[in-house]
Every structure is written in C-alpha cells, then in structure tokens.
Image: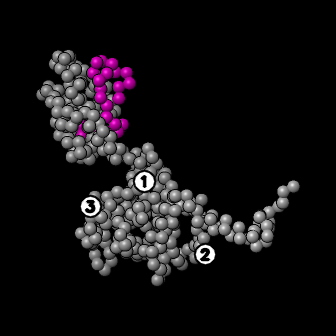
Amino acid sequence: MERVPTAKDNSGANFTIADFYEAGRERLKLTTLVGGAGMDRRIVEPMVNRPGLALTGFYEHFAYRRLQLIGKAEMSYLKSLGEKTALERLRALFERGANSLIFTGGTEPSPKILSLVSEYGRVAFSSPLKTRVFSHHSAFVLEALAAPKTSLYGTTIEVCGLGVMVEGDPGLGKSETALGLIKRGHALVADDFTCIRKDVANNLLYASASASTAGYMEIRGIGIIDVGKIFGVGAVRGEKRLQMVVTFKRLKDIAGEVDRVGQKRRFKTILGVDVPQVIIPVSEGRDLVNLVETAAQQQKLLLSGVDVVGELSARLKSRACRATGSDRPENSKPRR
C-alpha cells in the first residue's frame, strides 16, 4: 500500500462568534441584540448549553466555553427569582467565562439584562425558534464551522455516484475531461480548486466549490461557462463525499512506473483520511473521459467487495491446475 500524504490532520478550525452569526443567521433566524467587540471572541467548544443548573447557583462542571441558550424555561425561572437575583445569577455566568447568551423561543430579555451583557463585553442574540429546534440546527452549523478544512488544486466531479477529484499539472485536460463527463450525465462539484472538509465523527471527506465559483468552469478557448444554465441544474452538485482521486501525469514522466495490472493500491492522505488514488498516464490520443469514468466504475466494484485482479488470478491458477491434471499448482508441496 503506497501512501501519498498531502495535508496534515488537525483538530479543527478556529472561528469566532461573528463567524457563527454569519454562518447561521438565516438557518437559525438570529438577531443581534448586543454585539460589539464580543463578536470577535473565539468559540472554544462548538456546542450549545442550557445553563439551568448554573442559574440555580451550582457552577461545578458549568460548560462556560459553549454558547449559552436561554429558553422559556430558563427565562421563567429567572423571572421567579426577582430582577435583582436574576441579574446576579447572569452576572455569575459571565464572571465564570460565558461568552454569550442566545434567547430562544421568542423570549425577550429586559433592558437591564442587555445592559449587563454589554457591561461585560459579551454578545446576545435572539431567535424565534423553539429551544430544541435551535439546538438541533445549531449543531449542524457549529459542526461545519469547526470541521478540519483544506483546499487542493483539482477538479471534482460526481461520477457514477462517486465523488472523484481529478488533479494534475496545468494543461493536462482536467477541466476538459470534467466537461466530457458532464455531457455524459455526470455532475460538476468544483472546477480547478476544491474545498475539502472532514467529518471527524465518521472520518469522511466532503468536497465542494468555493462560494464564489460554484457552478462555473473555465474551458481554454471558450472561457467561463455556467454549467447549470447550459446542462441543467442536475449537472451541478453542492457538496459530495470524496471517494477517489485521479491523478493525471505525462506518460514520459512515469515511464516504467505504470501499473498495468492494477494490483497495487495507491492512497492519497488528505486531513488524515486515506482516499483511493489512481494515476492515469496522459498522452496524445488517450480518451481521458472514458478512462476516468471506467476508473470510477472499477472503484465502485472494489467498494462492493469485488476484486477483479484476485478473481483473474484465481482463474489462471485453476486453469494451470487443470492443465497439469492436479488440484493444486505444480510448485505446491504434497501433504505428508
């Protein structure tokens, strides 16, 4: 097994409360009540927390590094304490490191609560979503922000249901190959520059285009094309699991290194995940569209447990045994 490392693994991306707001503003229906310098605070633990116990005065194991949700239950409890005690309990949260308050379920904080948030330089948001709904959707937003990420030069296409990234030196025909695959019914994910994020929980990689170039391709001699408008919306994918890397190399650069049987398994390590890799020699007259499509189909067989090389090897051994009138190869030793 040959490994070709490209990027080191990491524990996750760094992001701020401002990044969370921008990423989740529409999905979470966020409104900023108090912002300012507190928006630049880093989110250390990308999770949300309901500080019910902390509001009662029990601060052991208080998850202060997380975003703090104040739902209807928490707000009703604070109101039952009276304004002075309620403010003291919230002040205690900030003194123990809480960086924000998010009021969910349509709860409305009093002006004095917002003044307290501002006094400590913290952030306050509101959302009309129910607390359980907000918790559910915020988990997806925070996971996407915290996921390890990298970017690689390569064109990614969905081929036969697989996410395939085609990489290689400029001028080898990556975009033209992708265009040919799209015309065969496959779909574009990213042209020339692929953004990759890691699903840490499942150790999987997902590829996508940058927000500014999604759906567009550059074809030498033609220019920029809008794939969705030319071939239909089904010809573009927003994000796709990366399951294979195809590397184009000039034939002269790998003379004598081409694996003609396909027995050697290559992998490219991206963010700590091993992705199957196929190296395709590029020379004049080779049908790269057909080769990439066939490589993807072959990979699907391997994923389903079909080992073509192994099957052929077994067949040849079987024929050799029959030709010698034996049930075993000639070089095998008889049992005693």
Q: Amino acid at mark 3?
A: Ser
What span is colored magenta in the figure? 38-63
Mark 1 → mark 3, Cα distance in angstroms:
21 Å
* Residue 38, image quadrant: top left
Q: Tell which circle, 3 or 2, labels the residue nearer the N-terminal end.
A: 3
- Label ID, residue 256: 2
Q: CA distance from mark 3 to mark 2?
A: 41 Å
Element class at badge 1? strand
From the top left corner, tell me how far across and down residue 246 is, in percent: 47, 66
Position above or below: 78 against 280: above
Q: Position of residue 267 (x, y in %)?
A: 53, 60
State the residue position of label 3.
212
User: What is the three-letter code of the residue carrying label 2?
Assistant: Gly
Circles 1 and 2: CB distance less than 8 Å?
no
Q: Is residue 2 left or right of residue 51?
A: right
Mark sitting earlier along the chain (1/2): 1
Residue contact between numbered discs 3 and 2, judged by CB atoms under 8 Å = no
Q: Position of residue 333 (x, y in %)?
A: 82, 61
The residue at which mark 1 appears reads as 205
Left-right relation of 197 to 56 = right
Per the image, label 3 sits on a secondary structure element best described as: loop
Residue at left offset 51%, top offset 66%: 298
Query: In the image as oriented, which residue stretches furthest toward the right?
Result: 336
Q: CA distance from mark 1 to mark 2?
A: 32 Å
- Camera-side residue: 279 or 137? 137
Q: Position of residue 330 (x, y in %)?
A: 80, 67
Question: Identity of the amino acid at label 1?
Answer: Leu
Crowding at dot 3, Cα within 10 Å, few <14 / some 14-19 / many 20+, comes out as: few
Residue 104 is one of the magenta-drawn residues: no
